[in-house]
Amino acid sequence: MSAENIRVILVHTTHPGNIGGVARAMKNMGLSRLILVEPREYPAPEARWRAASAGDVLDAAEVVSSVEEAIRGAQFVVGTSARERRIPWPVQDARRCGERIQGHASRGEEVAIIFGREDRGLLNEELELCNLHCHIPSHESYPSLNLAMAVQILCYEVRMAGLGGVDDAAEDDDWDTPFAPAEDMARFYLHLEETLVDIGFLDPKAPRQLMRRLKRLYNRVRLDEMELNILRGILSETQKHQRPRDP
Amino acid sequence: MSAENIRVILVHTTHPGNIGGVARAMKNMGLSRLILVEPREYPAPEARWRAASAGDVLDAAEVVSSVEEAIRGAQFVVGTSARERRIPWPVQDARRCGERIQGHASRGEEVAIIFGREDRGLLNEELELCNLHCHIPSHESYPSLNLAMAVQILCYEVRMAGLGGVDDAAEDDDWDTPFAPAEDMARFYLHLEETLVDIGFLDPKAPRQLMRRLKRLYNRVRLDEMELNILRGILSETQKHQRPRDP
């Protein structure tokens, strides 16, 4: 198990009881790093009560104001998604996600697992921050799991993968360069978008799905730091040569 | 999926919220048959609230007064157990239990999954009613899962086994005779115990672990109806030939 570099992130949680339930579910499965993005009501007695003997996980939880802040430093980001999205994203079921999370974490990479709001899940712009989307194959008659239950299942799969010695980080198994952390990717996307506007390829008034598709592309491939530097270099050069032409 | 012949049984549940959480967890995974053995507080608004859109599972739940009544008709009985027991019982992890439950259910057998009290789990005499004990491999720092979470994990594993087409009912794959239901096994054990007392093998004042070991033996092997009839016949004959010798 590589618990210390796996963080669980809850985004805009409404019910404090769910936060407590999540803390307990995590500790039951050997995880301890919880980050809360703008919870509606926290701290709260209900959270404490539902956490039972996992009060230490609550005590150590960080409260931050954005998903970007929560995933800072993360090199592999998994987002949980119940709904179908307009643009398909790489998606795997909880079992396979558990194996991949465990595989990356056991290599010493920083891993983040993001869970959305009780009612609406993660927004499209949050899902776009992820390398992989996780799907829990619930029944069509009532597919919507309680938040803490979803966390329980995924943490359970992470633990099962750790116990089984599964080590399955897919195609980037023996990489020689670290993968870029989330905040570098975010800067890259801004730079990319800016450049695309600069060169007139992207109309900010009618952006359509362009940036979303590009993010999916780069998040799917996971850029290493060297690759990212190269791409940033290209963008800078592009901008440099573009600007003089503006009136 | 063979949901209709899988029943989830909760024994002496203390918190009604957990009953609601269980109903939702079941419906999320395509199960619907819930039996409550002497819940402390039920019906209750907290159960209704936590069930969310699984109110129909609560509406259809049966309330009974004993575990024996709850498992009536069941041909494969799984009990969930966190603690170590004095006498080891056949035990498998939740994944393997999910596969076996699905395997038996898809053959049309009646399956029962029993969950114990929030604080103490199942008692020894309840665990002895089971063919198999289920273990969720939680972390040693805090092994005790919330009741509804444990139900969620096992129902999830049952569903995953169903979706994966896993069909693994172990060694009794192609049986030609139905397996004996739980109430026939209970009668058999009473008959056996009575006979053992009759013949002076079992001292009711100092029973030790004898009956427990015998139950483990027969529950591990799962008797089919024909075998059970044969054993019952042997016991009857034994008693018949014993009684005339009594003074």
Image (cartoon, coloured by chain):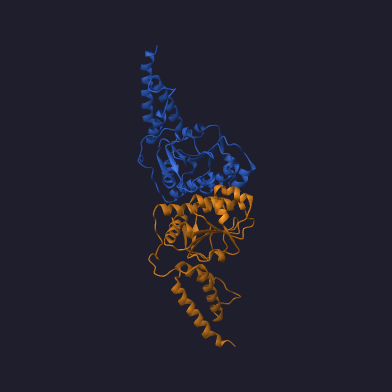
Chain colours: A orange, B blue
Q: Residue at x 56, y 77 (%)?
A: A194
| Vertical placement of residue B66 versus A30, above or below | above
Give coordinates of residue A2: x percent, y percent. Answer: 45, 57
Residue A124 seen in this snapshot? no
Q: Is residue B221 left or right of residue B51?
A: left
Residue at 58% of width from left, 77% of height from top?
A: A203
Looking at the image, how many numbered discs can be counted on the residues?
0
Horizontal and vertical percent position of residue A30: 48, 52
* Residue A207, position as x, y percentages in the image: 57, 73
Q: Is residue A31 left or right of residue A177?
A: right
Quick one: quadrant of the N terminus of chain A? bottom left
Locate the C terminus of chain A and report the quarter of the image it occupies: bottom right
From the viewer's perspective, tell me whether residue B244 is left or right of residue A54: left
Quick one: B7 or A155, which is closer to the camera?
Answer: A155
**Is residue B231 at all visible to an observer of this figure?**
yes
Please state the horizontal and vertical placement of residue B125, each as a whole percent of the image.
47, 32
Tell me which residue sits at (45%, 56%) in the image: A98
Residue found at the far top of this picture:
B247
